[in-house]
Structures are given as C-alpha cells and as structure tokens.
Image (spheres, rainbow, N blue to C red):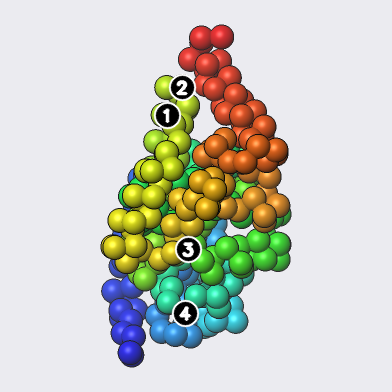
C-alpha cells in the first residue's frame, strides 16, 4: 500500500500545535523535549534545539534526511542559525527500526520520570485499557544524554513497544502520526499518575490469575498484539509475568512482580521501591 504524507505546511502547523500541548500539559520544561515527523519515507521535520516548545514558530522547524543531514535550516528570532537537537540520533534510530512509524515524541513527563528515579517500572499488567493501547511500558537502560548510548538504549525495545520510559531522563513514544505519538505520551504519564495515586492510597493491587486470563482473552478477541499482552500472561503453573525492561540493565522493578516465583530478586527490590515511594510521600504530606 502506498503511504500518503501530509504536506509540509500541514505538518508544520500540526507540529506546533502538538508542541504547545506538550508545554501546556507540563510534559516539558524550559527547552526540554523534541518532536519529529516524516514528510516522506526519507525526510523528517524536527524541532530545533534550545527553544521552549510553547514558543516555537512553524518556520523554525528543521528538515533533515534519514542520515541526519540538514536539508532545510532556519533562523531564530535574533537571526541566529538554528541547531539540530542532540537527540536527533535517537529519532533516526526509531525510524530505522520502525517503517510503520511516522512520528516520534520525546519529553520529560515528571511523574513517569520520577518513577524511573524511584526504580519502579510502569510495565505491569495493571490497567487493561493501557495494556490494549500501549502494551507494556518498559524502561530503557540509563544512557548519558547526547551520546550514542541514547539510540543504543532504545533500539531493541522500540521494535516491539510504542512507549518507553528513559531511565533518569524522560519518555519516548511513537505513532502513525504526531497526535498518535502525543496521545501515547499522555497515556504513559496518566498511567504513572494513576499508579502514584494507588501508592499514596496504600499500594498497587495486582490482578488475579483469572483477571489476567480474561484480559488476554478479550485482548485477543479485539486483535491486540500478543507482544503487547505478554505482560499479562501467566505460565502453565499459574505464575504471572514480571515487568519487561529489566533485562536492559536499568534496574527498575516491576510494580506487579510480587506474585512472581519465590526467589525472584525483583520481589525484594519491588517491595523496597514501594516502601521508598511510600516513605517519600508520607514525608511530603507530613505524616511521618
Ligand atoms: Zn530529553
């Protein structure tokens, strides 16, 4: 099937609207974050470095090819030449891995990023609608900003998942268009907010084996990808899956792991992460 792309004018307008939404929703501060979208299979429009997303102008967006070469530059409000973002390599890596992806969003949503600092993964079988829309939300391994480590850290996970937490950094989502990528980011941060609320109220209740079975059954009937639902699967002995993403070396612990097999080191880590989150919250609200 031949894919059609929006015109450059339409894409510039859409990108500015999504940038403004990112800022309004507090997913970025100062000059954080970046957005990109395909203009064609081999051309991207991307936000420049160094600007608040709420202030960007359509004419400041830059055009690059898939090797990251600047095709069309621009000048900022003081006539300065605009620079490409240091995160461009991460965007290019995503497009290389996913021909189905037409837009990439990177931001620093505070609650999801806070979860990575606390070492608590968002990747659990907790909210069926999140499983059906995002699948698991793994955490990519820590990578020093601006280095080649950043694209390396997302390469494997982004092949399967549309929404990632970047350890001690932020989040990355992809979509069939800019709004699709944006809404996945919104969903990721909302999931973190719901989980934080549950922690504040005493903890995250896990799904029973029967509930997991039903989630997978309904998901299969809805045509949800198997990989997306892997986090809800139970094995033949009735044990639940643990969080995805730990293998990447990030050290995060799945919030839904405590029902996993005994001897799983994640259990202790998860409990200590939960205790830590609770302790911090209790301190903040002056109850300890
Ligand atoms: Zn960033």
Q: Nearer the viewer, residue 207 or 270?
A: 207
Sequence-wise, which precedes: disc 4 or disc 1?
A: 4
Residue 209: percent from the left, percent from the top?
A: 43, 43
Are dots 1 and 2 in contact, CB under 8 Å?
Answer: yes
Dot 3, crowdedness within 10 Å: few (<14), some or many (≥20)?
few
Residue identified by numbered label 3: 227
Residue 187: percent from the left, percent from the top?
A: 37, 49
Position of residue 43 in the picture relative to residue 168 (left or right): left
- For label 4, being within 8 Å of ligand 1 is answered no
Q: Nearer the viewer, residue 174 or 237?
A: 237
Q: For the residue labelled by badge 2, is the local secondary structure a helix, a strand or a loop?
A: loop
Sequence-wise, which precedes: disc 2 or disc 4?
A: 4
Residue identified by numbered label 2: 202
Q: Nearer the viewer, mark 2 or mark 3?
A: 3
Figure check: 261 above or below 249 = above
Q: Nearer the viewer, residue 238 or 137?
A: 238
Q: CA distance from mark 4 to mark 1?
A: 37 Å
Q: For the residue labelled by badge 3, is the local secondary structure a helix, a strand or a loop?
A: helix
Residue identified by numbered label 1: 198
């Amino acid at each position: 099937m031949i894919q059609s792309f929006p015109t450059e004018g339409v894409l510039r307008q859409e990108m500015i609207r999504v940038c403004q939404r990112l800022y309004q929703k507090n997913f970025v501060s100062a000059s954080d974050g970046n957005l990109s979208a395909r203009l064609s299979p081999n051309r991207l429009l991307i936000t420049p470095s160094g600007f608040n997303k709420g202030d960007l102008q359509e004419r400041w967006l830059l055009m690059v090819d898939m090797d990251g070469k600047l095709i069309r530059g621009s000048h900022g409000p003081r006539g300065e030449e605009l620079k490409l973002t240091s995160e461009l390599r991460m965007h290019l890596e995503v497009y290389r891995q996913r021909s189905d992806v037409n837009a990439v969003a990177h931001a620093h949503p505070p609650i999801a990023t806070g979860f990575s600092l606390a070492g608590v993964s968002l990747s659990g079988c907790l909210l069926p609608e999140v499983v059906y829309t995002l699948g698991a939300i793994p955490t990519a391994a820590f990578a020093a900003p601006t280095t080649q480590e950043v694209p390396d850290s997302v390469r494997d996970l982004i092949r399967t998942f549309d929404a990632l937490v970047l350890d001690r950094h932020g989040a990355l989502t992809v979509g069939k268009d800019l709004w699709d990528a944006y809404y996945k980011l919104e969903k990721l941060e909302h999931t973190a907010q719901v989980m934080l609320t549950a922690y504040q109220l005493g903890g995250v209740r896990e799904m029973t084996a029967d509930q997991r079975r039903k989630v997978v059954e309904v998901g299969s009937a809805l045509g949800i990808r198997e990989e997306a639902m892997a986090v809800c699967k139970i094995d033949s002995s009735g044990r639940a899956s643990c969080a995805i993403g730990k293998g990447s070396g990030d050290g995060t612990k799945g919030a839904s792991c405590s029902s996993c097999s005994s001897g799983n080191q994640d259990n202790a880590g998860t409990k200590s992460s939960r205790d830590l989150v609770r302790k911090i919250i209790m301190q903040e609200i002056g109850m300890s």
